[in-house]
Image (cartoon, rainbow, N blue to C red):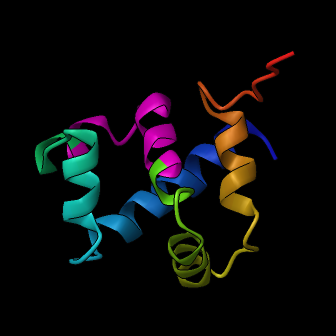
Amino acid sequence: MQQEFAETLALRALAWLAGNEELLPVFLGASGASEADLRARAAEPEFLGSVLDFLLMDDAWIIAASDAQDIPYDSLMRARALLPGGEAVHWT
């Protein structure tokens, strides 16, 4: 997977999140973002990474977003790894 494709998957996940009336307010509250921020920052890889970070907190959210996009369940996790801040942390 390349970073451009990762950004595309994350943007599609953002579109799914924006259309989810129950989950969108949770994301906005947790991130401090506004609906205007969603539009203004949708092209920023760092912001897209925060969207994927949020979705990756709950398996049910990943399953729903992946099913809606018809992608494998690990795709959003792999996409996150390619966006800024998604590098694996080595604590040793």
| Residue under the image location 12 percent in, 44 percent down | 36
Q: Is residue 71 left or right of residue 85?
A: right
Q: Quadrant of residue 73?
A: bottom right
- Is residue 62 placed above or below 14 in the rendered structure? below
Q: Quadrant of the C terminus?
A: top right
Q: Is residue 56 left or right of residue 20?
A: right
Percent of width and height locating residue 11: 47, 53
Percent of width and height locating residue 19: 28, 74
Q: Residue lying furthest top in this view?
A: 92
| Residue under the image location 65 percent in, 58 percent down | 76
Percent of width and height locating residue 90: 82, 21
Q: Is residue 22 left or right of residue 74?
A: left
Q: Is residue 37 magenta?
A: no
Q: Is residue 47 magenta?
A: yes
Q: Is residue 6 left or right of residue 31?
A: right
Task: Write the start and end of the magenta stretch as one range.
Answer: 38-53
Q: Main secondary structure of the magenta part?
A: helix
- Is residue 81 placed above or below 67 in the rendered structure? above
Q: Residue lying furthest front in this view?
A: 92
Q: Nearer the viewer, residue 65 or 90?
A: 90
Percent of width and height locating residue 35: 14, 51
- Is residue 90 placed above or below 72 in the rendered structure? above
